[in-house]
């Protein structure tokens, strides 16, 4: 009987090893990403550029424990979001879609000679 039990363990060990390996390669990146997101949210401050999960981007004007107020658009509309709605946080120099505030304002002004937008 002990020989049969030993053979069963030998047959099961590779399967257990594969299951353990798969758990490790799926859980570890999730934990790392969760830590990065928490750090990003904790370091968010007034003046940072953010992008929401809905695609809206703007500058943070107020941050508290639960909510973030974001200023967006040419009329400087202020919108309040929960922290969970923020997808990414960047520095003030690194703005949404790689455009700086100067580039956005230049692109929205009209050319006086042609009357067309640049």
Image (tube, rainbow, N blue to C red):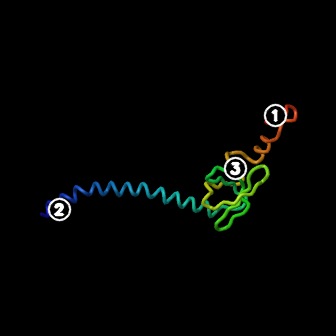
Residue 15 in percent (x, y) is at 29, 55
Q: CA distance from mark 3 to mark 1?
A: 25 Å
Residue 55 in percent (x, y) is at 64, 49
Task: Specify few, some or many for label 1: CA neighbours under 10 Å numbering under 14, 14-19, or 20 or more.
Answer: few
Label 3: which residue? 95
Task: Specify few, some or many for label 2: CA neighbours under 10 Å numbering under 14, 14-19, or 20 or more.
Answer: few
Q: Quadrant of residue 117?
A: top right
N-term mark: 3 or 2: 2
| Disc 3 element | loop
Task: Specify few, some or many for label 3: CA neighbours under 10 Å numbering under 14, 14-19, or 20 or more.
Answer: some
Label 2: which residue? 5
Q: CA distance from mark 3 to mark 2?
A: 63 Å
The residue at the far right in this view is: 113
Answer with left or right where residue 72 lies relative to residue 29. right
In front: 53, or 32? 53
The residue at the far top in this view is: 114
Q: Label 1 near label 3: C-beta < 8 Å?
A: no
Label 1: which residue? 116
């Amino acid at each position: 009987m002990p020989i049969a039990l030993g053979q069963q363990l030998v047959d099961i060990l590779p399967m257990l090893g594969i299951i353990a390996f798969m758990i490790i390669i799926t859980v570890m990146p999730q934990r790392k990403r969760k830590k990065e997101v928490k750090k990003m949210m904790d370091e968010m401050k007034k003046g940072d550029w953010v992008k929401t999960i809905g695609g809206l981007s703007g500058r943070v004007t107020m941050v508290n424990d639960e909510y973030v107020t974001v200023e967006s658009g040419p009329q400087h509309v202020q919108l309040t979001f929960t922290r969970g709605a923020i997808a990414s946080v960047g520095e003030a120099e690194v703005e949404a879609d790689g455009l700086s505030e100067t580039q956005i304002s230049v692109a929205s002004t009209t050319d006086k000679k042609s009357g067309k937008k640049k």
